[in-house]
Image: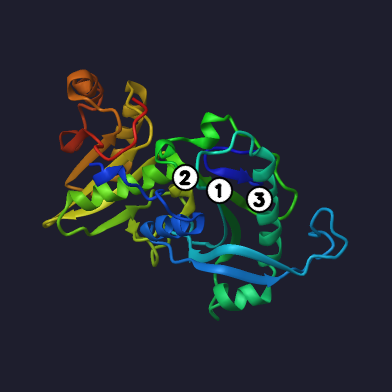
């Protein structure tokens, strides 16, 4: 089943010339640039032996599969679950022009091929030696996939292909944990939010805030923020970043959806849980207009009268963020 983030078995202030991370690049180059901005260090073009040759045999072929080829791979200790190490296999798809009208079959084949790669990668001694095993492994391995599906049309840089098309895919039967999808709107949101955070402070010392999941409270490993944005947060519509501003630490919370009262209330509630150590928190919406929304913001803040932190929360327009208006 496809949700905003992907498939699961367990469950820019605008840049000159309207440029974006999507413009004029090959799909894999776009993916690499975006993931680097999110603190990822992927190894590109990875080939490894297939251990289920008959099961993974390509359609309309008579020979068992000999190897898998993926566009990239990354392995990292999850900052959201201190018992988990993530192995991520990446497949990059790209259209130089507009998104195609009926790519559902193609996307399923992409997801199926990636699921088969993950199925073999998790048990591959070759992959383990190159990316996973460090001689002191204490974490459980989870094997995820990432499909990036972009078009380089600047007119589509704010298009959510999966949401706008109501896209649903069957889940491949191969063994994997989760397959995530990133499209143009998601890429633009990530890119724009991080660039806005970099513009916020001359120091440009930014990191990603990790919420308390109940699984990342190991006293020896606890860290409320870090330089790596894990896949789960990469596919979230709320992105919190920590920015050092002089001697103070500010939290910038970027929202991918437009402002409305119930949503703002939930975000402010989250701020109280996530950001008590910060001296200031700014919440950014792509369509925020003080002349239209200040009264709503005041009304919502009134519901937090007993909070000592509410006076340090501001709501702003994300000048770089994509807006549907």
Up/down of 51 relative to 251, above or below: below
Q: In this rendering, would 86 be left or right of 207?
A: right
* Image quadrant occupied by the C terminus: top left
How far across and how far down the image is residue 244, in percent?
19, 56
SS of the residue under disc 2: loop
Query: At 39% across and 61% down in the image, what residue appears?
Result: 36
Instruction: Determine whether label 1 and label 2 are within 8 Å by CB.
Output: yes
Task: For label 1, count other residues whose C-alpha is less than 10 Å away and answer few (under 14), some (14-19) or many (20+).
Answer: many
* Earlier residue among tags 3 and 2: 3
Residue in the image at 46% along x and 59% along y: 29
Calculate the distance from the C-alpha at mark 1 to the C-alpha at mark 3.
12 Å
Dot label at residue 235: 2
Q: Which residue is mark 3?
A: 110
Residue 90: percent from left, percent from top: 56, 58
Which residue reaches farthest left? 246
> Seen from this angle, which residue lies furthest right?
62
Rounded to the nearest whole Å, what is the CA distance between mark 1 and mark 2?
8 Å
Foreground disc of the pair 3, 2: 3
Q: Is residue 155 above or below residue 113?
A: above
Q: Determine which of the numbered discs, if any, sits on residue 180 in the image.
A: 1
Q: CB atoms at circles 3 and 2 under 8 Å apart?
A: no
């Amino acid at each position: 089943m496809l949700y905003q983030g992907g498939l699961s078995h367990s469950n820019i202030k605008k840049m000159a010339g309207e440029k974006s991370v999507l413009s004029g690049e090959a799909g894999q180059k776009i993916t690499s640039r975006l993931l680097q901005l999110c603190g990822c260090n992927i190894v590109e073009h990875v080939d490894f032996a297939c251990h289920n040759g008959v099961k993974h045999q390509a359609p309309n072929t008579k020979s068992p599969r000999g190897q898998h080829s993926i566009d990239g791979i990354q392995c990292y200790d999850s900052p959201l679950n201190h018992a988990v190490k993530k192995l991520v296999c990446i497949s990059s798809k790209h259209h130089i022009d507009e998104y195609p009208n009926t790519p559902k079959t193609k996307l399923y084949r992409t997801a199926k091929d990636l699921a088969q790669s993950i199925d073999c990668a998790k048990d591959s001694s070759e992959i383990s030696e190159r990316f996973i095993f460090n001689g002191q492994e204490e974490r459980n391995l989870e094997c995820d996939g990432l499909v990036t599906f972009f078009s380089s049309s600047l007119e589509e840089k704010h298009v959510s292909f999966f949401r706008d098309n109501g896209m649903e895919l069957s889940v491949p039967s191969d063994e994997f944990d989760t397959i995530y999808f990133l499209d143009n709107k998601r890429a633009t949101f990530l890119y724009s939010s991080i660039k806005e955070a970099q513009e916020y402070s001359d120091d440009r010392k930014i990191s990603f805030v990790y919420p308390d999941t109940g699984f990342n409270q190991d006293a020896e490993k606890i860290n409320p923020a870090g330089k790596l944005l894990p896949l789960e947060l990469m596919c979230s519509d709320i992105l919190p970043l920590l920015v050092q501003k002089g001697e103070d630490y500010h939290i910038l919370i970027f929202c991918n959806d437009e402002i409305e009262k119930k949503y703002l209330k939930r975000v402010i509630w989250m701020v109280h849980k996530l950001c008590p150590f910060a001296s200031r928190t700014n919440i950014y919406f792509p369509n925020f207009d003080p002349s239209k929304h200040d009264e709503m913001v005041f009304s919502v803040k009134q519901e937090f009268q007993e909070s000592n932190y509410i006076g340090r929360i501001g709501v702003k327009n994300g000048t770089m963020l994509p807006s549907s208006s």
